[in-house]
Image: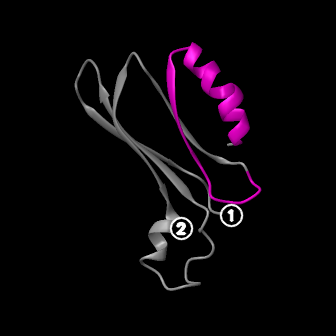
Amino acid sequence: MDTPYYKEMLADEMSLIGYHGLFAPKCIPGRPEGVAIFFKRDKFKMEESKACHVKEHAAGTFKQGEFPECSDVVVVLAALRHKISNSLLVIGENSECI
């Protein structure tokens, strides 16, 4: 998702119809892209959210050069509590590996 589009238009438009958004940018210089998740504010309460950049985690696990094809992947995770049933829903969205 294009970062300026999310920040300047989509987040506000989705908020007007009752959604809350989470966004995490990719770590690619010159490419303003990222990943977003939206959920209904009246149905869910966010308990926790986290953005994970695969490159940061892979650096401690893989040798230099072993993980180049997915170094720009970002994952957004959210733990949402359903307001009526009190059930916990954990969702995630990731950017594609290019």
Quadrant in the rendering for residue 48: top left
Look at label 2 and name its amino acid: Lys
Tell whether position 49 is magenta. no
Query: Residue 98 bears which disc, if any?
Result: 1
Quadrant in the rendering for residue 17: top right
**Which residue is located at x 61 percent, y 27 percent?**
11
Mark 2 lies on a secondary structure that is helix
Tell whether position 27 is magenta. yes
Nearest-to-viewer mark from 2 and 1: 2
Disc 2 crowd, CA 10 A, few/some/many (<14, 14-19, 20+): some
Residues in magenta, as a range: 2-31
Look at label 1 and name its amino acid: Ile
Q: Where is residue 30 in the image (x, y as percent from the top left)?
A: 77, 56
Q: In this view, does 50 lie above or below 52?
A: above
Task: Looking at the image, tell me whether mark 2 or mark 1 is earlier in sequence order.
Answer: 2
**Which residue is located at x 62 percent, y 54 percent?**
26
Q: Quadrant of the C terminus?
A: bottom right
**Which residue is located at x 51 percent, y 16 percent?**
18
**Which residue is located at x 28 percent, y 20 percent?**
83
Q: Where is residue 82 in the image (x, y as percent from the top left)?
A: 30, 25
Q: Distance between the residues labelled 2 and 1?
A: 13 Å
Mark 1 lies on a secondary structure that is loop
